[in-house]
Image (cartoon, rainbow, N blue to C red):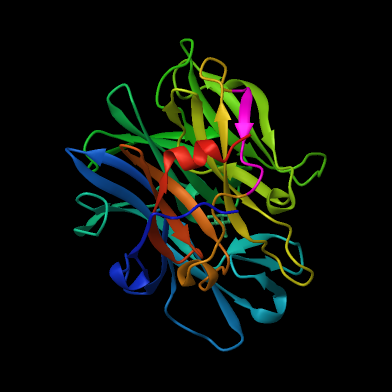
Amino acid sequence: MPLARTSERLLLGPGDVTPSHDDLEVIGVFNPGAAIIAGEVVLLARVAERPRERRPGFTPLPRWTAGEGITIDWVADERLDKTDPRVVKRVSNGQTRLTFVSHLRVVRLGDGSAVREVSSTRLDPESDGEEYGLEDPRITVLDGRYRITYVAVSCHGVTTALASTGDFQRFERHGVILGPDNKDVVLFPERIKGDYVVIHRPSSPAGFHRPEMWLARSPDLIHWGRHEPLYGGQADWEADRVGAGPPPVRTPEGWLLIYHASSRPKPGQRVGVYSVGALLLDLENPAHVLKRTVEPILVPTSDHETRGFVAGVVFPTGLIERGPTIMLFSGAADERTTVLELDRDDILNAMS
Ligand code: MAN
């Protein structure tokens, strides 16, 4: 049984954000990282844009190039497999491209319940490894600085890069920390036994493993090692993919990790249903799973989640604690951003 949502609000949709370029239109504002700065909730939202221009029989595939900004490759429709709304594949060589390009935008929310300002501050692609965009940031405060792990997509694959900021106005880039294909990377908010710790999600086409999250440790946030498997999807609702949601939070019983999971797509479809579960990890050795929710705690139910660019997706990426309440800043159907509230004890009580 999914848990009761004590509150649910729509925060952002494509119409709330101005495009980064006249030739582009915004098609999604979703999967945001969340943090508190000077008492205010701030989101770093993923803004997905696609070319405005249409040419019958052709699909525009945007990409960022040094010196030129966004350029568009026009590919004849008959050369593309378009069954997944997120990606197209060239029929000739099976290579994947995105039909949109994403950047990250700073949004200020006051107490977290409504948007106060969509700022003009952006993190744009800035290297070849980011040519298809920046996606799905997670934010953790560590050593007094906001650390941002984000997905960098390019013809070299799907990687995770690190950035940091002290004020959400100027950002420092630290480069790729986990090579292809790896995403859904979240940093723990404190060192554990002297090490920085991340949860990450490697994926490979070889097909030996169940969908799985891994854990790794680092002395400096850049060099990651001592990788070990953390949790592989077991039930039908997590049979296709599992990946960390927002960064874990400390509770007296253990680290609470909220994660997303997708079921296997139905015949004839490319995308399964994206639900949400939770794990409780040992405080001293977070590679040890103490408890989990056997059933999902959230499934896509609201209109925003069941209809949109990718229907049937609830995808939390930001978390703010307010006493016993957990505010989850979530992507809905890869198109909008919502804030959902759950009772922390309800989550802990749903675990076994
Ligand atoms: C993948 C990524 C996410 C997206 C989900 C649901 O995990 O592309 O950005 O939100 O799928 O479509």
Q: Is residue 231 left or right of residue 55?
A: right
Where does the image place residue 57, in percent across and percent down from the top left? Answer: 61, 86
User: Quick check: 198 above or below 258?
Assistant: above
User: Quick check: 168 above or below 26?
Assistant: above
Q: Is residue 92 left or right of residue 225?
A: right
Quadrant location, the C terminus? top right
Give residue 174's quadrant in the image: top left
Residue sitting nearer the eye, 304 or 240: 304
Residue sitting nearer the eye, 75 or 24: 24
User: Quick check: 64 above or below 28?
Assistant: above
Q: Is residue 11 visible?
A: yes
State the residue at coordinates (60%, 20%).
225
Q: Quadrant of ligand 1?
A: bottom right
Residue sitting nearer the eye, 44 or 282: 282
Where does the image place residue 206, in percent across and percent down from the top left? Answer: 81, 43
Where does the image place residue 166, in percent across and percent down from the top left? Answer: 24, 33
Residue 292, magenta (yes or no): yes
Question: Magenta region: which residues?
Answer: 287-295
State the residue at coordinates (37%, 74%).
23
Residue sitting nearer the eye, 5 or 226: 5
* Residue that sits furthest to the top in the current view: 193
Where does the image place residue 227, in percent across and percent down from the top left? Answer: 64, 23
Residue 68, magenta (yes or no): no
Give residue 233's quadrant in the image: top right
* Residue that sits furthest to the bottom in the current view: 56
State the residue at coordinates (44%, 74%).
51
State the residue at coordinates (53%, 50%).
153
